[in-house]
Image (cartoon, rainbow, N blue to C red):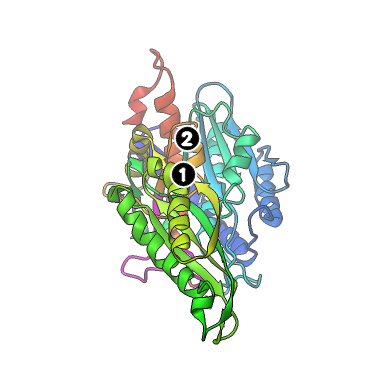
Amino acid sequence: MRGRELRGELDAFLAETEQDLVAFRRDLHMYPELGFAEYRTTQRIAERLTAAGLAPSVLPRGTGIICDVGSGDGPTVALRADIDALALQDEKDVPYRSTVPGSCHACGHDVHTTILLGTSLFLAQQAAAGLLPGRVRLIFQPAEELPGGALEVMAQGGISGVDRIFGLHCDPRLDVGQVGLKPGPITSACDRLLVRVSGPGGHTARPHLTADLVFALAKILTELPAALSRRIDPRSSLSLVWGRVEAGSAANAIPDDGIAEGTVRCLDENAWHVAPDLIKSLLESVAGAYGVEAEMEYTRGVPPVVNDEMSVEMLAEAAQRALGAGSVAPTQQSLGGEDFAWYLESIPGAFARLGTRSPGGRTYDIHQGTFDVDESAIAMGVRLMAATALTALWESRPVTVTDPITTLA
């Protein structure tokens, strides 16, 4: 299918469905569900896929869907969207504000889900018309924020037989119509660290007769991040940032325990592998110097998302075909974590950043209760993902004399 033909078919499809897709996104936004509890969301997706003649398969936990479009002949390309919300209060004053206290779609997963649904409906039409040169696997993944949903999908054979996989994420720093692409690492590893400190407490008038636990905890809070920056190649950007600290209940009493909790982020996979042992060694050294006991709970999160270069080229080609010249923008590796990384450790693929900012408008940061998008980004996302799937299928097919290679021009 030539670029102009594809754009024309997408124009016609979106003229009929764009407002319906916006309404679907707003419905998801009003009823957000946290990881592995996305039952209503899963049901709504399944209903729409079934109505389009597809056969969605719900994952065993009851949340998340895998659904194939097209025949098993030829290559198989997967498209993934995450469907879970965040445990944050929605602070927006909009008609579609979250109705669930303490939960909202502050990371754009409702947009990702809606884009994949729209792409699914378009590809189902293409398959019915005999225009799909292979199979597309749709992955509506639960629990990205926990993380762990990607591992659940993989355990159920979600990427078995898949040749290549693609995903996207809202980027409020890019205008609608732009796509941020980068070969190689595009996100970071992200782990959780919990430190428990204990020692003999006492009166603040006699710190020399106790282990001055609050002072020792403060040293751990400052010296661990500083020491890490001297023990790891700075190009790895190994970063320890604390998010929660608790110790004591009275101004004149030295407590006998305290905790600190934070995240460890890293751009480099090799540094990510050595981080737990290094942090444990540094922690024991600092704690020992101040006479307290320190225990560490290190919870592995996700490795960096590492984009395959050929897959990035397919995304770029699809963006130019479906969104127009100038739509591709370079982007930098971020310190955010994303469990799409697990897929890319098994099969090639790429992760894109989709512009959601109104040109000249406000930049809404993700993971904030005020986050929102310019909803015209939904149609842009459908164009991008549909064109990417078709591009990847055609370019993955074995070349034969009868293959319409010129249709990729």
Q: Secondary structure at mark 2?
A: loop
What is the x, y in percent for residue 323?
35, 48
Q: Is residue 264 above or below residue 100?
A: above
Q: Amino acid at mark 1?
A: Pro
Q: Is residue 132 above or below residue 401?
A: below
Q: Is residue 374 visible?
A: no
Locate residue 389 relative to residue 332 in the image: left or right: right
Quarter of the image containing the N terminus?
top left
The answer to which quarter of the image holds residue 360 is bottom left
Residue that badge 2 annotates = 345
Residue that badge 1 annotates = 303
- Whether residue 400 is in magenta: the answer is no
Locate residue 239 relative to residue 29 in the image: left or right: left
What is the x, y in percent for residue 154?
60, 36
What is the x, y in percent for residue 185?
36, 43
- What whole-number distance in Å separates the C-alpha atoms at marks 2 and 1? 9 Å
Q: Amino acid at mark 2?
A: Glu
Q: Are marks 2 and 1 in contact (CB under 8 Å)?
A: yes
* Nearer the camera: disc 2 or disc 1: 1
Q: Which residue is the extreme one toward the top?
A: 401
Which residue lies at the image location 66% right of the left edge and 35% below the top edge? Answer: 156
Which residue lies at the image location 59% right of the left edge and 60% below the top edge? Answer: 85
